[in-house]
Image (tube, rainbow, N blue to C red):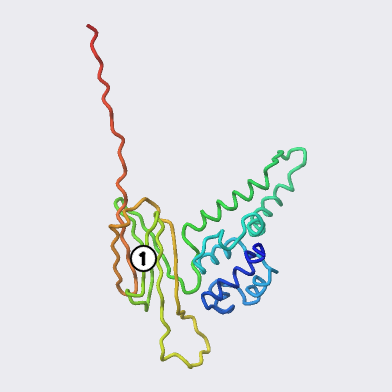
Amino acid sequence: MKNKEHKIENKIKDLRKQQKLSQEEVAEALGVSRQSIIALEHGRYMPSLPIAVSLCDLFDSAFEEIFQFEHETKKIVENISNNVLRKEATMPLELEPWRPFREMVTLRDAMDRLFEDSVVTPKTAGMPKIDIKETKDDVRVKAELPGIPEEEVNVEITDNVMTISGEKKLETKDEGEGYYYKESHSGAFSRSFMLPSDVIAEKAEAEMKHGVLTIVVPKVEEKKPKKVTIKTKSAK
């Protein structure tokens, strides 16, 4: 029963219902079709690596909370490993090196790529655009948040990971009106990313101006090596 509850199709459906999202809303946020979400929730489809990262971002969940490492992670990285194995298959058999742990290494490398690629979580529909700049003394982050008041925005820094979250509320005057086409988004959002250097989180400063949130965080001063003078005793 426990394994059944942890299956990705059950986990995705539960997370979607917890956040009160429709299949259409999830599909739009991930940039895929509704049919893909239906297939995902019925266990007929495994997401690609970028989509898997986007799912973690959308539901604000750790990778291992959604996917079983031993079973589902292997399926997710098949697109990467298959490309590698196809290239290796063209190598003459007598020249191919024997690597008994190839599958294990391929999986580990794919997971490394997952976390390297997700230093900044992917930009999905409704998420703020992020710019990160590092200077000699600080790290500067800019997030585009048009139409969102500063009291609806939260910024947290934990272990050099910055999370910008908030909510864009739906304008009540739009309720009941029919749209021919609509790109604007409303609802809660959250985006996390690793800062490029160690910072002093408690000294961070943030300012909202013209729909752009600017956050400046001073860097931890680099420790300089202390030179030790060696004294010599003169022989008596």
Picture coordinates of residue 164, whole percent (x, y): 40, 66
- Residue lying furthest top: 236
Picture coordinates of residue 98, whole percent (x, y): 72, 38
Circle 1: element type: strand
For the C terminus, the image quarter is top left
Q: Which of the pair 226/5 is nearer the observer?
A: 5
Q: Residues within 10 Å of mark 1 (few under 14, many from 20)?
A: some
Q: Is 234 situated left or right of 88 in this image? A: left
Above or below, comparing residue 205 to residue 159 in the picture: below
Picture coordinates of residue 136, whole percent (x, y): 30, 50
- Residue lying furthest right: 93
User: Residue at left 41%, top 81%?
Assistant: 169
Which residue, given by chain and number where applicable, does mark 1 sit on?
155
Q: Mark 1 belongs to which amino acid?
A: Val
User: Residue at left 46%, top 81%?
Assistant: 184
User: Residue at left 45%, top 79%?
Assistant: 186
Above or below, comparing residue 52 to residue 174 in the picture: above
Picture coordinates of residue 42, whole percent (x, y): 68, 72
For the N terminus, the image quarter is bottom right
